[in-house]
Amino acid sequence: MASIDTYTTLKGQTVYRVRIRRQGKTQTRIFLTKKEATHWAQQQEGLLLAGLAGIPQKRQHHTLAEAVEYYCQEVFPRKKPSTARSQKHLLPFILKILGPSTRLDAITPAEVRKLRGALEAKGNSPATIVRNLALVSHLFSIAIREWEWVDSNPVRLVTKPKEPKGRERYLSSGEIQRLLLVCNKSRSEHLYLIVLLALTSGARHGEILHLRWQDVDTTQGVLTFHDTKNSETRCVPLTGIALEAVREYRAGASSVPADFLFPSPKNPKKPLAIRKAWETALRKSELKDEAVFHTLRHSCGSHLAMSGASLLDIATILGHRSLEMVKRYAHLSHGHLHQTLERMTSAALS
């Protein structure tokens, strides 16, 4: 009852199309591997023979606009608010290029390549293009798995642009001292401590600005980050000059401090915005064209590696789920590796 056809796309990728015919009706699905195609075909044949399933009737056609509406209503609420906000900004351009009235099952890999080309022509970076395509791909995955509106995902057959390597820039000890000196003289009374915490904890911009007083334990010396990129709570030691600075900052705060560690002066229920103060500090530190706030996080990881920390230690502090993300620091820890190998050799061979 089932047949599997192999064909090659315009990009040279081999795909497998399964066709099941019964009583004049046809069911078709496309897979990237023959194993997936065979498994699905056998599964469907078994259900048909057992009388537990039939070839579905021709499904109702749904447009891209309908899919986007459903996606916004059902999927975005399950995502982090910051992720949902950033992805919603991508949708208008996607709808404009693919067409809101276009049937979802009529969007082919060629249409997706058209979207990719439009994003490139607009001057978007490879990372931005990948994010756009990933959003469309996830929409199709939901439409297949949960809504049963379509049978295949055309984005999977389109080549994504290669993203560049992550930033390798980190601040030297001299640059750090120069930056902290400028921040300490900033008109923003919070900038120095914010930058100091970023350098000593490796936390991201949003993680630090969303710190609340309950997340700061000056007795045990621990910072707890809840609003993290991977949605996992992370605890980082608070020591040395950073711990003393936080204690001093707490002593100078009002008797009933705001919920946020760094509240907005206009609305204490929102975190502080430091963009202008940060850009001024970069300019005065002569780092404007070379550094961004995320450079502070990379500086923390780099100096940890140079001080002898293992990649596992760095991953734990920075909150990376895998060691792949911290391999960029491996070349900075040669001294530590040399000492480790020397200790092993001495113990094993002497």
Image (tube, grey):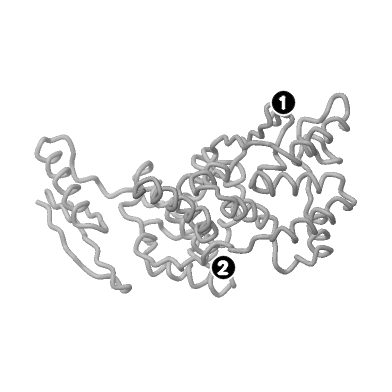
Residue 100 x/y as whole percent: 50, 58
Residue 121 quadrant: bottom right
Q: Position of residue 348 (x, y in %)?
A: 35, 47
The spot of residue 184 in percent (x, y) is 86, 50
Residue 135 in view (yes/no): no
Q: Nearer the viewer, mark 2 or mark 1?
A: 1
Q: Residue at x 21, y 68 (%)?
A: 7
Is 246 displayed left or right of 80 in the figure? right
At 75% from the left edge and 47% from the top edge, which residue is drawn?
A: 196
Residue nearest the viewer, comparing 86 with 74: 86
Q: Which of the 4 image quarters holds residue 240?
A: top right
User: Do the residues bearing badges 2 and 1 touch, measured as CB atoms within 8 Å?
Assistant: no
Q: Earlier in the sequence, mark 2 or mark 1?
A: 2
Residue type beneath disc 2: Ser
Is 286 placed above or below 222 here?
below
Residue sitting at 20 percent across and 53 percent down?
37
Q: Secondary structure at mark 2?
A: loop
Which kind of residue does numbered mark 1 sit on? Thr
Separation (CA) of disc 2 from disc 1: 45 Å
Q: Nearer the viewer, residue 133 or 92?
A: 133
What residue is rendered at 68% in x and 45% in y? 200
Pick the residue in front: 260 or 303.
Answer: 303
Which residue is denoted by mark 2 in the rendering? 125
Does residue 110 appear to the left or right of 78 in the view shown? Answer: left
Side of 125 relative to 272 (left or right) = left
Q: Is residue 34 visible?
A: yes
Task: Describe the element under mark 1 as helix, strand or loop.
Answer: loop
- Who is closer to the viewer here, 154 or 178? 178
Residue 219 tag number:
1
Asked if 325 appears above or below 15 in the picture, the reply is above
Residue 97 percent location from the top left of the image: 52, 66
Q: Count residues near mark 2 (Cα–Cα under 10 Å), then give few for <14, some for 14-19, many for 20+.
A: some
